[in-house]
């Protein structure tokens, strides 16, 4: 793990939220994402006329309006990625969950994306290893099981209850199905029916479903988890506690293989921007929290309340390291849940450009755990 990642947890815990400007507009999705892709022309970074020209006039970058995508939120908001791109314009797009972002990447409407491990694996396997590569890490942690404390007081109480995940086959869905299996309980992965009812629910809908009592809890990323807590929920489990080193990949950076081959200079520039963004987040935790909140507001219409973002932010560890070994573990979980067949993940990573950027910045190189291009 790079030094910047090690210091993130310490630095992110310091201080209260920085003051945010009042941002006007209706709360379309409360920072929880949109069902379809959205071209956010208002926040596209337009280069200066005399900026250095790279090989592509624009790069289409996808991400979720979730705090687990802090690198994207802050990097776009602060212009740290755009600064490295010279004359190449960023066209950002937001997504609610991984499968729809993979569809955009495989369909040619997206070049680079911030995304979780499970959809990365699914996309790689479905295209027989032809359409994408993981080129960097971005974040670890930031996933919690939040429940109604009146109905659920212990983990054993989950049996017979309705628990939401964001989407069938997404990273949290796979992790929860694996946890259920390790409890010795049974759930059909397709329908979600069984000893626990797994209810696949859009993150922006989950808080209302929780308040109305149609679900008893949710295994979700931030800020949805802290939103549920603010509505009376209780954190019963932090997924970080389930991992041996307390670290697991929650967000990767992926790229279309076609775009990587044709525009390696643009991909390298984006990675310079993400590495500098993570360094800035670690060095300026309060400013970074405010910046991420401002970007969520720009995407959704309103900033997150301090009671939501303050507990959410410290649980997320930004890192350039893709934590490749944990991706293999999550792949094994998806196989065990019968969501995918045993995949050959050899070649899913190409960390060549990232390690070039890290070396130039005087930072340690990172490993692909034997799953890199040969």
Image: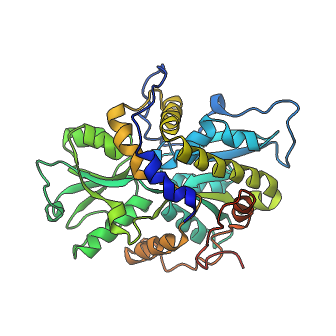
The answer to which of 75 and 340 lies nearer the viewer is 75
Q: Is residue 197 visible?
A: yes
Residue 140 on image: x %, y %: 47, 58
Q: Quadrant of the N terminus?
A: bottom right
Q: Is residue 144 left or right of residue 122?
A: left
Residue 266 on image: x %, y %: 78, 51
* Residue sitting at the far left: 150
The answer to which of 254 and 165 lies nearer the viewer is 254
Q: Quadrant of the C terminus?
A: bottom right
Residue 218 on image: x %, y %: 29, 52
Q: Is residue 235 left or right of residue 11?
A: left
Q: Is residue 176 left or right of residue 247?
A: left
Name the residue rendered at 62%, 60% in the picture.
136
The answer to which of 257 and 355 lies nearer the viewer is 355
The answer to which of 211 and 189 lies nearer the viewer is 211
Q: Is residue 209 visible?
A: no
Residue 270 on image: x %, y %: 71, 50
Looking at the image, residue 218 lies above or below residue 224:
below
Q: Quadrant of residue 167 in the image?
A: bottom left
Looking at the image, residue 92 lies above or below residue 165:
above
Q: Quadrant of residue 280 in the image?
A: top right
Name the residue rendered at 36%, 31% in the picture.
305
């Amino acid at each position: 793990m790079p030094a910047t990642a090690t210091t993130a947890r310490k630095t992110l815990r310091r201080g209260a939220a920085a003051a945010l400007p009042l941002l006007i507009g209706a709360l379309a999705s409360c920072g929880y994402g949109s069902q379809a892709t959205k071209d956010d022309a208002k926040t596209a970074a337009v280069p200066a006329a005399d900026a250095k020209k790279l090989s592509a006039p624009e790069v289409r970058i996808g991400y979720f309006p979730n705090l687990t995508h802090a690198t994207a939120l802050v990097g776009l908001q602060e212009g740290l990625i755009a600064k490295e791109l010279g004359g190449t314009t960023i066209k950002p797009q937001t997504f609610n969950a991984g499968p729809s972002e993979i569809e955009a990447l495989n369909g040619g409407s997206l070049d680079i994306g911030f995304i979780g491990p499970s959809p990365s694996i699914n996309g790689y396997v479905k295209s027989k290893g032809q359409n994408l590569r993981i080129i960097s890490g971005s974040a670890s942690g930031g996933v919690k099981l939040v429940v109604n404390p009146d109905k659920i007081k212990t983990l054993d109480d989950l049996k017979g209850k309705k628990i939401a995940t964001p989407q069938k086959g997404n990273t949290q869905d796979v992790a929860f199905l694996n946890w259920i299996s390790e409890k010795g309980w049974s759930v059909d992965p397709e329908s979600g029916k069984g000893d626990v009812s797994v209810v696949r629910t859009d993150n922006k809908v989950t808080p209302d479903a929780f308040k109305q009592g149609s679900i008893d809890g949710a295994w979700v990323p931030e800020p949805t988890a802290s939103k549920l807590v603010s509505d009376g929920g209780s954190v019963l489990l932090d997924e970080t506690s389930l991992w041996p080193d307390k670290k697991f990949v929650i967000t990767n950076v992926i790229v279309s293989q076609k775009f990587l081959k044709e525009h390696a200079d643009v991909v390298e520039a984006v990675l310079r921007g993400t590495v500098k963004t993570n360094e800035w987040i670690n060095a300026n935790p309060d400013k970074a929290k405010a910046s991420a909140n401002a970007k969520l507001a720009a995407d959704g219409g309103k900033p997150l309340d301090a009671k939501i973002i303050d507990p959410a932010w410290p649980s997320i560890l930004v890192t350039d390291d893709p934590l490749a070994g944990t991706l293999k573990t999550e792949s094994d979980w998806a196989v065990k849940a019968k969501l995918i067949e045993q995949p050959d993940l050899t070649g899913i990573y190409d960390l060549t450009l990232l390690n070039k950027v890290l070396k130039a910045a005087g930072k340690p190189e990172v490993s692909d755990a034997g799953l890199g291009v040969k």
